[in-house]
Amino acid sequence: MEQKTIPFVGYSLFAGALGEFTPKSKTFINTINLHSFVVAESDVEFKESLLNSDVLLPDGIGAVLGPRFLTGHKVKKTAGANLHHYFLENFKSKGGKFFYLGSAESTLNKIEEKLRANYPGIHVASYSPPYKATFTDEDNQKYD
């Protein structure tokens, strides 16, 4: 099934419901709101990341009202937390893999423990790298 998207100020926003979302084996998902749109205008790499997303979800009232006001297209806000919950529930019986990057190791450990208890069919891994402006090739390959 082809994903429903709409063009908006150079981006292709996902305009379907989560039940219509069709992930690939590895799917690069981002959310966009007014803040991320403004940041992307001065951060070329960040903008490239948004533009190269497999799915770009409207997250925030500005990402919902902007397209409606400027183009007449109606999109539904889909926060990252909603997407996360959707995938957890969707993969609860099928199994799947979830990877969490960032945050303190203690926080990631709590996330992993909770998910293993509530979603035993899901494989969970995480990585808490030391802060750095750029990841090395070794960092990027660690959990590929």
Image (spheres, rainbow, N blue to C red):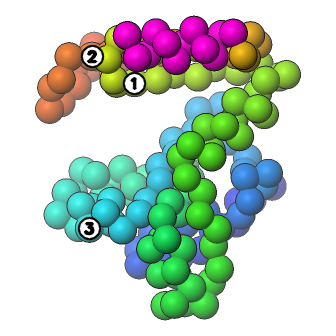
Q: Amino acid at mark 3?
A: Val
Location of residue 139 by image quarter: top left
Q: Is residue 142 visible?
A: no
Relative to 70, residue 38 above or below:
above
The image shows residue 134 at horizontal and vertical percentages of: 18, 30
Which of 130 and 136 lies nearest the eye of the viewer?
130
Q: Is residue 107 magenta?
A: yes
Q: Considering the image in quadrants, where does the N terminus appear?
A: bottom right
| Magenta residues (range) | 106-117
How many residues crowd mark 2 within 10 Å: few (<14), some (14–19), many (20+)? few
**Residue that mark 2 sits on:** 129
- Three-letter amino acid code of the residue under disc 1: Leu
Q: Earlier in the sequence, mark 1 or mark 3?
A: 3
Task: Work out how far the residue at label 1 is from the one at label 3, CA to CA, in angstroms.
Answer: 24 Å
The residue identified by callout 1 is: 101
Relative to 102, 27 lies left or right:
right
In terms of secondary structure, where does tag 1 sit? strand
| Residue that numbered label 3 is attached to | 38
Task: Give the main secondary structure, helix, strand or loop, of the magenta stretch.
Answer: helix
